Amino acid sequence: MSARKAALAGAGTALLVGVGFVWSTPFLWMVVAALRPEGYGPTALASLAPDFVPTLANFELAWQSADFLVDYANTLIVVSGILGVQLVTITLAGYAFARLEFRFKEALFYLFLLQLMLVPPILIIPNLTTTVRLGIYDNLLGVMAPYMASAFGTFLMRQAFRALPRDFEDAAVIDGCSFLALLHHVLLPLVRPTLVAFAIVSVVAHWNELLWPLMVINSPKRQTLVLGLASFTQASEGAAEWGLIAAGTLLVTLPLILAFIAFQRHFVNSFMSSGLK
Amino acid sequence: MSRFLTDRTRSLILASVLASGLAGAAAEAATSIDFYFPTPVQGPLARELTRIVKEFNDKNPDIEVVAVYTGSYDDTRVKAQAAVAAGKPPGVALMSANVVLEFVLNKQIEPIDDYLVENKLDPKTFLDDFWPAVRPNATIDGKIYAIPYQNSTPLLYLNADHFRAAGLDPDKPPATWTDLVSDAEKLTRREGDQVTRWGLTMPSTYDYCGWLIQSFTMANGGLFYNPSYGGEVYYDQPSTLGALQLWKDLAFKYKVMPQGVIDPNQVSADFFSGKASMVVLSTGSLTFIRNGAKFPYKVAFMPRNLRNAVPIGGGSLIAFAGLSPEQRKAAWRFMSYMTSPEALGHWSRFTGYFSPRKSSYDLPEMKAFIAEHPDALTALQQLEYAGPWLAVYDTVAVRKAMEDQVQAVLAGKEEPADAVKAAQKAADEIMKPLTAKITASVSP
């Protein structure tokens, strides 16, 4: 019986390893392609096996093709700036929609959700006009401004607060707890997994965004990473230099990958511990 | 307020606000203009263009041109239009040659004629130095609105080894559609039902798709669109239908080309790896093919049915409306610097595009280059048969109306006869704002 169990567990592990391998193929291919010397022949292009002497030439070329240090700094400012404001706005808005009673609450909430249906390109011109009027055109603040409130985040936080039993709050209020203290000591620790999950989605989305920064930013010294990457990898005519593209993409994603590895346990715990029930 | 907004987070926000605020307040001494540019071919082009702009700035200390990389041709168009709407037009932009008309219809750019006259230059003499094929897309209602900068045409690339092995002469590439089909059949290798080598392949993704269907339509005697009025396309004409039928037959009847929508990167990879013997790609790919092909290759004209004809592609410089007198002066100095025969010759050698200016080819460095790379000459000779590129009201949408149908045919989901009708209907619908105006003006 236990032998059978072990075999089953083994098969399960093998299956997961298989799925993991399939999932990570694009990433493995990117690493192999980035290290492949130029002119190695496109026949080897599809190969996953490193059948060559690895070279860092692609990385060197990619590094020279854009101002990576400046781009890293700008991207970091943009994603942390957006996230910082978002965490405040979505927590407060989510709480309001979950707990407070006010007129037109439902209608307002659906209006909020309606935002999710809008395709971003139709907002380019109105948003850009607002950006110019606010005096934050060609400015990192202009990149961040449209994202400082998030319909998705508000929805997520509303659901998280609604899932909490009211008793916690009632108990705290009876004990004379103020709203901010209630938020700090009772509510936030309980919705922390939701906040972390939202943070991951937000950071990844804005790290990878091309269209809006492309519209707002003119000065090369205010470029974000993806803009820098696109400047030497996009092409409509001509053809792809895969090694350079792979190396550039790796440089762009590296900080995110490192951050994920460093905080992996933390993230997984956040997703696992729903806190209640 | 909570552990999620720690002091560190707060100071980061503060720092970012300060940093971006300070950067925005940088003082401007010289006359400053923005220059928007896309990079249609890969590699260090953005860096080279930035270097050229820096060189210009160093030579002209009273002018500061800010080189702004703006993504693809299409992103550049969106960004320029959004910037104009928001009241921040750039000075100069490198724009896809076939959307210049839209900017004119929207009154967003200024005629180059005005600049030429102000600088005591004759517009006609100026235009005479450009190849006839690139003039129509740059000239609207008799006025020059754009200066061609980088141009291309479709070109047939072939693997000379494969030709010889199949008993064909690589110096006699297929000249007609009949030759194209019969050569492709001889070059295609099959093992049972499996094709191990394709006789021909060509890209059919957006942009390339519309360009190539126009190319085949022109070679079939057709016009594709009305070059003197932006409200007419000839998608449902026999010449277009015949072109689409050929494209379909290559894949479905003769089975010498893969079925489905094909990416340009796939095309060049198949050519390099010997999985395809002939490919259709832009002349702009010539440098890339030259550097990447590990076998003898040849380049040839696009095969004809009724006539040799190809559309041009590429980008031109345009100058935006609403510049101050100082900015206009700066814009003109910059544009004339960028489009001098020497500068265009340099850019042509660097990218693989041909120089739109005839006098570039009289320069000694250009003569030496062509002597070294005679295949660059074929692209140039084909220019004699080149015509303007689809440019109508809302060009991109009208082009996509056709491309969606071509792609449906290539996927085996639709018949060419129905496809061209559907494309025509969709295109007419898109162009209505312009065509309605015309109809209204003739009604009593």
Image: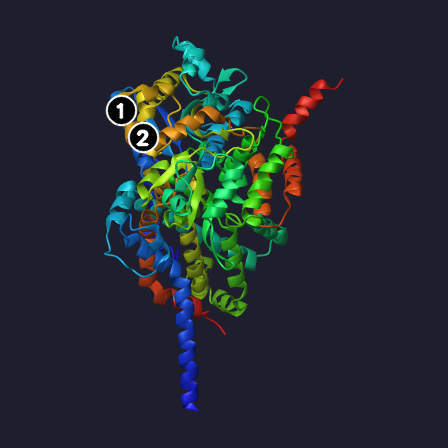
| For residue B55, side relative to residue A236 (left or right) | left
Q: Position of residue B181 (x, y in %)?
A: 52, 42
In the displayed structure, B6 sits above or below B320; it is below
Task: Give how far apart the Cα atoms at labels 2 and 1 are.
Answer: 10 Å
Residue at the location (46% across, 60% down)? A178
In the displayed structure, A257 sits above or below A172; it is above
Residue type at numbered disc 1: Glu
Farthest residue, direction right: B444
Looking at this view, is B187 or A152 the one in front? B187
Q: Position of residue B109 (x, y in %)?
A: 48, 22
Looking at this view, is B190 or B245 the one in front? B190
Residue type at numbered disc 2: Arg
Label 2 resides on the chain identified as B
Q: Position of residue B313 (x, y in %)?
A: 46, 31
Q: How is the image coloured?
A: rainbow
Q: Position of residue B411 (x, y in %)?
A: 57, 50
First along the sequence among labels 2 and 1? 2
Q: Are marks 2 and 1 in contact (CB under 8 Å)?
A: yes
Which residue is labeled 2 in the image? B349
Residue A256 shows in this picture: no
> Which of the numbered marks, if any, corresponds to residue B365?
1
In the displayed structure, A22 sits above or below B359; it is below
> Which of the numbered marks, if any, corresponds to residue A146?
none
Looking at this view, is A2 or B28 the one in front? A2
In the displayed structure, A179 sits above or below B385; it is below
The image quarter in which residue B324 lies: top left
